[in-house]
Amino acid sequence: MSGYNNDLLKAALNKLSIEYDDKAIEKVDIFYKMLIEKNKVMNLTSITDHDDFITKHIIDSLLPACHISFNDRQAVIDVGTGAGFPGIPLKIFFPDLNITLLDSLNKRLLFLNDVIKELDLNDIKTVHGRAEDIAKNPEYREKYDTGVSRAVAGMSSLSELCIPFIKKDGKFVFYKSKESDNEINESVKAVEILGGKIQDIFNVDLYGTDIVRKIVVVKKTKNTPNKYPRKAGTPLRDPL
Ligand code: SAM
């Protein structure tokens, strides 16, 4: 027994029709404990209250599962994973996924390596580097069925960091806020240049809050031209 009240988590999972067992709930508890402990010595998150962690980190990470299936064995990359969101919650509740957690800040990844070990997760790894550089590496370029990214950059810049990782016919899932309509509209050209097409935009209520999350799904229809992403820093400074 962890001592945490997991009624909120269980209610939200039921609402999202996500299956779980006691082991998955226990993994969320261990992840929370590790995050809070490490957060004392390293800046990992401003969300430390248990209920907030459950809603704003765990449940928020899982929201695309309302509309997208994560049940099969697909290769997923989480670009700018930070303290492991959305990648770690997705892996806990959809264990068949093969996940790469990418970030440019190595100390966060060292923390995530400990989390992966403690939670006994398989088929998940961390990769250190800037997305602009890693996406040029043939080991990672156009190798993923699905990509996810939350709170990293505006849609146009982020598209250049993310879409090059996705295989043709794969998809990238952007976690955006309710207020991001303009940002999404302005990214249409960039998405197209990179070989994608905005396929769906879903508004999903974040259980237990009045927050509405916008989930933007980009389908990769063509290969990304070789010149993208441009060199590190350029996509953020000068979005397509
Ligand atoms: N996705 C996490 C979340 O939602 O809690 C972390 C968000 S944090 C605000 C942004 C993260 O993106 C940071 O950990 C940062 O190091 C990483 N990041 C920013 N630019 C990046 C880049 N070009 N390549 C890889 N990681 C990047």
Image: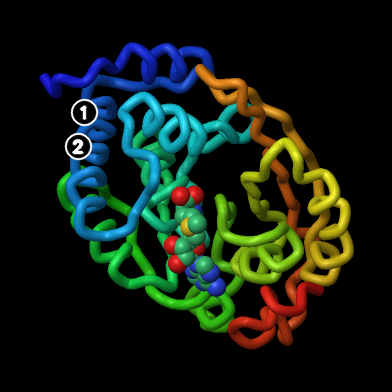
Q: In the drawing, does residue 44 fall left or right of residue 119?
A: right
Residue 189 left/right relative to 139? right
Q: Nearer the viewer, residue 139 or 67?
A: 67
Write the residue at 41% across / 52% down.
Answer: 98
Q: Are marks 1 and 2 in contact (CB under 8 Å)?
A: yes
Which mark is drawn over residue 26? 1
Residue occupying image coordinates x 32% and y 72%: 106
Q: Is residue 136 above or below residue 81?
A: below
Regarding mark 1 in the picture, which secondary structure is present there? helix
Q: Quadrant of residue 68?
A: top right
In x, y percent, where is residue 82?
Answer: 41, 58
Q: From the image, tell me which residue sits under label 2.
A: 30
Where is 80 relative to 14, above or below?
below
Quadrant location of residue 55?
top left
- State the scheme by which the image is colored: rainbow
Cα–Cα span, label 1 and label 2: 6 Å
